[in-house]
Amino acid sequence: MKWKISSMELMKVLSDPRRSRILHLAQDKPVTVKYLAEQLGEDPLNLYYHVKKMMKLELLEVVDTKQHGNLTEKYYRAVNIEDVVYSGNLDEQSDSVELTMSLVHRRLDPGLKLFQKALEKVREDKQSGVEYKRLPYNVTINSSTDRMTGIEWRKTMEPIMQAMGKNRMDKEPLPELPPQESDEEEATYQYVLISYKIEDADKLGLISPTEDSEEE
């Protein structure tokens, strides 16, 4: 696993769950914008903007081209999507606190809204005699707490991050962080894990439009 510092511009791109779908669709095989549009149910013209953004930030690359009459069709593949975890640039984030938090919420809020929608559907269907053994949408929110030192807490992050993606168990460990005076102190730490299916949230209209699409 490679760890890279994420610029604010990169954070803007990666904060949009729809763009995550594009990257994963282009992960295993080269894809065209037409193919992406069919899979996402989007107008191809709308996707060119997103593809251009991800090309600029080296998240996508052109691996092949095919000529169809007067048109040249490009084939794109995601770059190192499985092997890279991005860490925010502390200086940039502290200079743009409001923007940073809005980008964090852009990723979190669809999951929270989908969880609410799932519970509401269970409640509504219960009145018709329908019983669920699990939530009707693919979403989960789990939490736990533990008491430990700051050093122990940081060590718990590594297996969590490793488990968040496929085939990452043999990758690089988390980078070492500078020590702090409070590292030896025991404290109570809260863990909250939100995971949701982007397609479910998108289908229900829970993902807000990409705000930076109006910049160009």
Image (cartoon, rainbow, N blue to C red):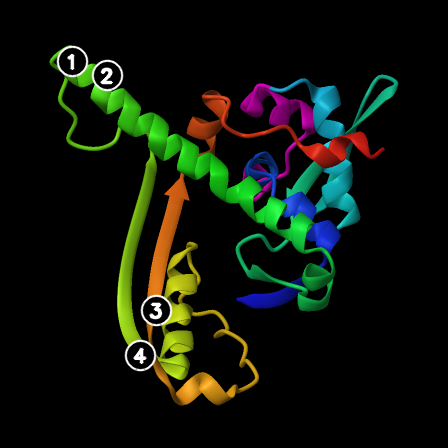
Q: What residue sits right under mark 1 in the picture?
A: 127
- Cα distance, mark 4 to mark 3? 7 Å
Q: Residues within 10 Å of mark 3 (few under 14, many from 20)?
A: few
**Is residue 74 visible from the viewing direction of this image?**
no
Marked residue nearer the N-terminal end (4 or 1) = 1
Residue 30 belongs to magenta span: yes
Q: Residues within 10 Å of mark 1 (few under 14, many from 20)?
A: few
Q: Is residue 140 left or right of residue 45?
A: left
Q: CA distance from mark 2 to mark 4?
A: 42 Å
- Where disc 2 sits, the SS reads helix
Q: Residue furthest right?
A: 70
Query: Which dot marks residue 118?
Result: none
Q: Secondary structure at mark 1?
A: loop
Sooner in the amino-acid sequence: mark 2 or mark 4: 2
Q: Amino acid at mark 3?
A: Tyr
What residue is pinned by disc 4? Answer: 148
- Rendered view: 48 above or below 108: above
